[in-house]
Amino acid sequence: MIRVENLTKVFRTKEVETTALNEVSLEIKKGEFVSIMGPSGCGKSTLLNLLGMLDKPESGSYTFQETEISSMNEKERAGIRKKNIGFIFQNFNLIDELTVFENIELPMVYNNISSSERKKRVNEIAERIGISHRMKHYPQQLSGGQQQRVAVARALVNKPSIILADEPTGNLDSSHGNEVMELLCELNEEGTTIVNVTHSAHDASYSSRIINLLDGQIVSERRQESGTLNKTTSL
């Protein structure tokens, strides 16, 4: 599904040049659940932004479902992103002025989906996620766990082939955090590819592969089955 080769990203100011990613190469197969770990500033979120087509690399190639992305302009990237990728963020990124229904519906508005189809999909996903009783509420009337469930529903409503999650449990207590991770596992078991950026070894334990970054480079990969790490590969 995803193949990245020698991906490099440099951020520049008048005084400082920072290499956030340094010739990163990786492959993510359809149906995988991958966690990306590492200390703050190691390049995790930069890599996720590039995989999500929210930014362009300095150099290197990025192939998404057999399509080369690196040389595309923002409009071209946005077209692919809207149809294929769902995002979940640590801070939920819900719009306070919109109801739960309207927040979930919003991605479909951008994709020009009909009103009747939008209503059908929102109701279906809200029932599945367990927030159908909150549809007329606003984000500030919800708990943190409920807000993140709304964010998950919004990420799913366009039926994406991959979900990119950036610290999805970072603002949740352990109980609600576990609920979100278990939900991601369920989605993965149904065939959705998941890429999860996290500081939490506990959250990473839900995934089938863990990629460790340090100073903008991949330094190791670990694979696990049934919650037990069974393979470590140093690069």
Image (tube, grey):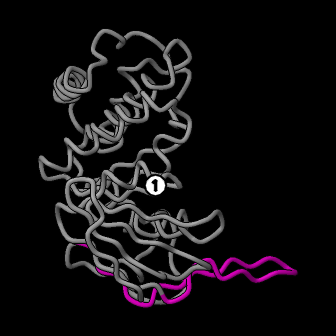
> What residue do we see at 20% from left, 79% from top?
66
Q: Is residue 122 left or right of residue 151?
A: left
> At which x and y percent is residue 88?
42, 45
> At which x and y percent is residue 189?
14, 48
Q: Is residue 232 magenta?
A: no
At label 1, which amino acid type do we have? Ala
Q: Is residue 18 magenta?
A: yes
User: Which of the two residues, 70 or 176, is positioned nearer the viewer here?
Assistant: 176
> At which x and y percent is residue 26?
35, 81
Range of the magenta residues? 1-23
Residue 76, quarter of the rendered image = bottom left
Q: How many marks?
A: 1
> What residue do we see at 45% from left, 73% from top?
73
Residue, disc 1: 201
Residue 157, quarter of the rendered image = top left
In this picture, is 143 found above or below 104? above
Which image quadrant: the N terminus? bottom left
User: Which of the two residues, 94 or 173, is positioned nearer the viewer here?
Assistant: 173
In this picture, is 67 found above or below 52? below
Q: Is residue 6 left or right of residue 162?
A: right
Q: Is residue 132 left or right of residue 144?
A: left
Which image quadrant: the C terminus? bottom left
